[in-house]
Amino acid sequence: MTSPMAWIVPIIYITASDHSPKLVWLKGKEDYVMLSTKDEWVKINYRFGSYYRSHYDEESIIQLSHDLFKNNSILHPMDKLSIVTDMMALLRIGKLNISAVLFHCDHLKKETELYLMSQFFFDLKYIYRLIIDIEEIRTKFENYSIGFSRPIIQRLGYDLHDDHSTRSLQTLAISVSVGFNEKETLDRARTAFKKYIDEKTPIDPDILTVYACGYIKLSTDQEWEQMLQLFISTSDTIEKGIYRTALSCSKSVLIKRLLNMTLNQTIIEIEDSMDIILDVSRSPLGANLAWNFVKQNWKRIKDQMSDDPHSFLHIISSAAGRLKTLNDLNDVKALKKRNKVEFLNSAFEEALESIGNNIYWISKNAMELQRYLDNYKWT
């Protein structure tokens, strides 16, 4: 008899030899599905129809990966999406080897579906944020990631198409290439945005913020100062957001200068100050800079945001939550202990949980990721 507390799980699956979906209901802990052969892959949760995680063993992953390398269309994009999200989730909790995950994802170099590539690039950015301080990995991981955005750009070009889905895929690929410092795309972004500033040459609005970031990454100190003044002086909300986001792409020394300016409301308004801190904390190199700034100016920032305390909570959880070392964890714990304000507890707890997860991920995956990239067959 099924327990009233038990979930009855619908298992819909296909196999390598039979793509007709089969439905089996698992009504108890001892229920199982008997497959016709053990020598072929199985795809569970057909078309991502149910929300549960499917844990594939590495042998099955390799079998499926080889078939996808030969023919990327054997699975529906929603099935490919569910596999990627399942694998990345299992990777985060230490249930899969990162080498197996990345080996499987290599077939995505031929992928054209926007939502699938969007999720995959999101996962790559998460990994990048965690390993960016590891010199032995960073550049190789940048090149690895560019290996997925570059084919899209080569196929579709830089000039955005009229079709919404196509231009969204182009924008995504260009954004990823800028984020991972791909030289050709950075150079193009710098040239285009410089003309936008100096000569008012228009840039497609869908790509404007990305190009602004690329411009700042390669900017001289004088060009950075020019962008800062544009941000401060403009009254246009959209333009201000573009310039502000771009400034968070700056070199570390300039980010520190930008953060210090947020303390002076005669230069930067309080609403913009909060957004700048959050933008910096979300940038790959900015988490430590943002958190150290918040920590060193704790009382002043807290007082500035007294009229909007929820924003201060957001800054704590966002800036501290992206830290990733044991020293960071202990530092945040100590600050929580010194600030015994019940209102702040939720933000501190959220940040501490995120830091713990980041530490765990690095301890489980960083060395294996380095080995994988050292032996990766670059194409």
Image (cartoon, grey):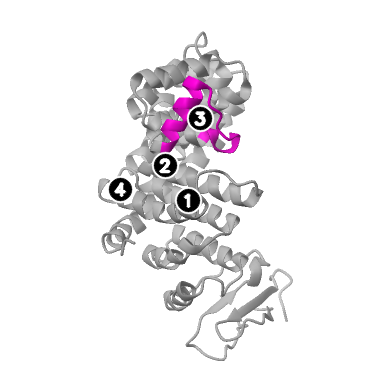
Per the image, the residue denoted by label 4 is: 139
333 lies above or below 59: above
| Disc 4 + disc 2, Cβ < 8 Å | no
Tell me the CA gap for discs 4 and 2.
16 Å
| Disc 1 element | helix
Residue at 40% across, 17% down: 225
Label 3 to label 4: alpha-carbon separation: 24 Å
Q: Earlier in the sequence, mark 4 or mark 2?
A: 4
Label 3, on which residue? 245
- Residue located 67% across and 66% down the image: 50
Residue 359 percent location from the top left of the image? 38, 49
**C-alpha distance separating marks 1 and 4:** 20 Å
Q: Nearer the viewer, mark 1 or mark 4?
A: 1
- Counting from the top left corner in percent of width and height, residue 199 is at 49, 21
Would residue 336 be visible to someone looking at this image?
no
Q: Which residues are magenta?
A: 188-209
Among numbered discs 2 and 3, the one appearing first in the sequence: 2
Q: Specify the principal SS of the magenta part.
A: helix
Amino acid marked by disc 4: Thr
Q: Which residue is mark 2?
A: 185
Q: Nearer the viewer, mark 4 or mark 2?
A: 2
For label 4, the SS is helix
Name above or below for residue 131 compared with residue 49.
above
Q: Which residue is mark 1?
A: 153
Q: Mark 1 vs mark 2: which is more N-terminal? A: 1
97 lies left or right of 165? left
Q: Farthest top residue?
A: 266
Q: Earlier in the sequence, mark 3 or mark 4?
A: 4
Name the residue rendered at 54%, 43% in the picture: 159
Q: Amino acid at mark 3?
A: Thr
Contact, mark 1 vs mark 3 (Cβ under 8 Å): no
